[in-house]
Image (cartoon, rainbow, N blue to C red):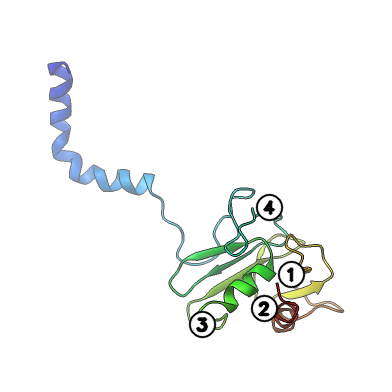
Amino acid sequence: MKRRRFVGIVRLLPLAPALLPAAFAAGCAREAEHGPVDIKWDRDLDARCGMVISDRRFAAQIRDPAGKVWKFDDIGCAVFWLARQPFDENAARLEYWVADQRTLAWLDARQAHYLAGRKSPMGYQFAAQANAEDGSLSYGEMKQRILARGK
């Protein structure tokens, strides 16, 4: 290294303690602590079945009480994954979302309304939406049907 360049670097060393945190913050953006996270479509994997999450109309997410987000390609996978945890959907600090089949907006899965008979990625055949309509099921009813069916 040439002397002139070395001297320039040496002059910047006193600024390093002030610059390093900003450099790390820019390079290591943290995931939000609340709310749904972005899914990398066709790359992220379902936490239960390992399938690639592709169909935005059926995706689901659970943020467990410890703050870790788990992603699913079908509400059925989320229901079965949750059934095997030491907590349930009513646990403190647990957040649970499902995509609205029409708008693709994230809905609280426990408040959403479910329509049966929809062709979903893992074949659980439920799609969520914000508003109730004739024949739609509550979260509890949908969960019972999925667990009774098994898989």
Q: Earlier in the sequence, mark 3 or mark 1?
A: 3
The residue carrying mark 4 is 54
Q: Earlier in the sequence, mark 2 or mark 1?
A: 2
Callout in the foreground (2, 4): 4
The residue carrying mark 2 is 111
Q: Earlier in the sequence, mark 2 or mark 4?
A: 4
Mark 1 Cα-neighbour bin, 10 Å: few <14, some 14–19, many ≥20: many
Q: Quadrant of the N terminus?
A: top left
Element marked by disc 4: loop
Mark 2 Cα-neighbour bin, 10 Å: few <14, some 14–19, many ≥20: some
Residue 46: x and y, percent?
Answer: 60, 60
Q: Establish if 88 lies above or below 39.
A: below
Q: Residue at x 18, y 20 (%)?
A: 5
Tell me the CA gap for discs 2 and 4: 24 Å
Q: Are marks 1 and 4 in contact (CB under 8 Å)?
A: no
The residue carrying mark 3 is 91
The amino acid on which the numbered mark 4 sits, given as a three-letter code, is Ser
Element marked by disc 1: strand
